Image (spheres, grey):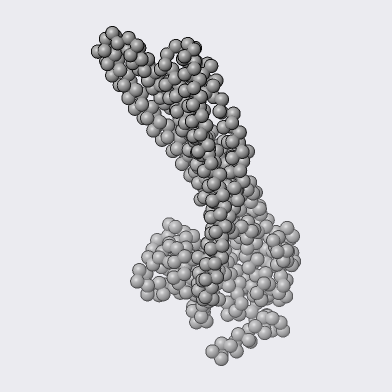
Amino acid sequence: MKELQYLNKYFVKYKYRFLLGIFITIVAQIFSLFIPQLVSHGINMIYAYVKNPTSDIGFIRKELLIILGLILGATIIAGVLTFLMRQTLIVMSRYVEFDLKNEVFQQYERLSQYFYKNNRTGDLMNRISEDVGKVRMYVGPAVMYTINTIIRFVIVIIYMYNVSPQLTLYTLLPLPLLSYFIFKLSKEINIRSTLYQENLSTLSSFTQEIFSGIRVIKAYALESQQHDKFGELSIESRDKNMKLAYVNALFGPLMILLIGLSNLVVIYFGGMMYINGTIANIGTIAEFILYVNMLTWPVASIGWVSSLVQEAEASQKRINEFLKIEPEIKNHTTKEEEIHGTIAFKNVSYTYEDTQIKALKHISFEIKKGETLAILGKTGSGKSTILSLLCRLYDIKEGEILMDGKPLHTLNLECLRNSIGIVPQDAFLFSDSIQNNIKFGKETATDEEVREAAKLAVVHDNIMQFKNQYDTVLGERGITLSGGQKQRVSIARALLKNPDILLFDDCLSAVDTETEEQILTNLFQFCQNKTTIIVSHRVSSAKNADKIIILEDGEIIQQGTHFQLLNEEGYYKELYWKQLSEKELS
């Protein structure tokens, strides 16, 4: 139960619902306990008449009808109160589920890039869906039936003790045996539930990857191979679930068996006590049998509730593992501040913790507000890392990054990222309309603003050729569009945001040369008063920049303007003549 203590704050939050549910449960149990007493009274009346037939049969009939009416009334009231109990406690569990899912989602948003590199998407989804669902079953049905069982046990045993202490003792004899079996089975359920949930996460992750990469699988004709792997994981999941179900299945029959033993005890010892005169009325035996049977469902539910608690604890443990992770990237201030866009890297080095690859080595440069910097270099030279560091997706440990003369990590993180528009190398689009994808960074934008941004990104004409134009709904990850179209929609999204800083990470790689020239012309006009960094493999994207730096193995090997770099031997000049000759040949 240690892991489930995390949920106590929600019981405090919804304490009034919780306490109301307990109160209704107590009242419902009191009304339900009238029934055995009324039945006992009715049986005693009938038995007395059988022993003495001279009694007034009309009076007895009238009394029996009153007893039946009272039993019916008590049953209806107890049923209504039980309904209200469920409405109170089960609805509370839905509120807790809502809060917990939001808490987990917010934690996912706060965690750094390293977290997502080390955890699979399917596992993340499983924890916010399956695991939270298991926890809700604890907060709702498990807690409700536990309260119901405890209250019923206490009230029923008090009533039984008041009627006959000795017979009550005999009736409760099987309970120690019941407690022992519950403890042993609950421990086993916890172990098997944890194994099943872990396997379910593996299965979810595998399935998610297959669906995301279905085009590659079809292209390589690997459907049967992946089907076999899925089959193996499914069989493993089934086996673990069957082992869990096997243990769960033992609870019900075991509880009913022990209740049956209690009934036999009541009949035998109660009968002997009546014969010996210890019990005055025969109806007491019937009353006790009804009491024991009133405990049948609560006792039988102990197994189910124990199973729910053990499964919830296993799930909450998996959730807590993520909730306890402290984000590496923290916002150190809530002060609102304006970002202008003067950027300076001073002797910055960066090593990725997961791979220990040193991506940047003693990088220094400066860009003033309104200037454009182009970064060129081979794949893996550290170009994208510079942009990631500017967005504070990672924090540096060597050197210093200044924004408007202030250390980057001291700025309000939300203000910083709101002032940046980034077009990543891998353009990500959502399964939504093209218009909503472009408006992603500025939801309040008008239709005219959206179209203007699309025109600047030279994608407007392509969109207008679609049947539903800007209302065209894209497939997952924008699969409906070509690579070049996805890149241009991403560019339109960044331009619509109209930030002070624009970062373009090789975002024209899938665009033809002519379209690239149009986009670049539009961009340089649009970005005149904005700080812009363009990462590219093409000289054409860099030649109009105010400053160009060339990276190789994380180090700056050349820097200057287009004309300065053309007048010195090195990577830039070689790349320029190579791409120029390729253009002429094409």
On the rendered structure, is 276 left or right of 316? left
Q: Residue at x 74, y 60 (%)?
A: 398
* Residue at image location 56% in from the left, 65% down from the top: 229
Q: Is residue 193 above or below residue 476?
A: above
- Residue 311 appears in the rendering: no
Q: Quadrant of the C terminus?
A: bottom right
Q: Residue furthest bottom?
A: 585
Among all residues in the image, which is located at the extreme top? Answer: 54
Which percent across, then down, holds residue 209? 54, 64
Q: Nearer the viewer, residue 333 or 150?
A: 150
Say how many tags the image has: 0
Horizontal arrangement in the rendering, residue 421 relative to residue 64 (left or right): right
Residue drawn at 61 percent across, 43 percent down: 188
Hey, which quadrant is residue 186 in on the image? Answer: top right
- Work out whether 500 lies above or below 194: below
Left or right of 489: which side holds 175? right
Give the quarter of the figure containing the N terminus.
top right
Give how far across and how far down residue 66 sits, in percent: 30, 17
Residue 155: x %, y % from top left: 48, 22
- In the image, is 384 to the left or to the right of 165? right
Q: Position of residue 216 (x, y in %)?
A: 53, 73
Please state which of residues 125 and 552 is positioned toward the viewer in this rendering: 125
Q: Which of 579 and 297 lies nearest the eye of the viewer? A: 297
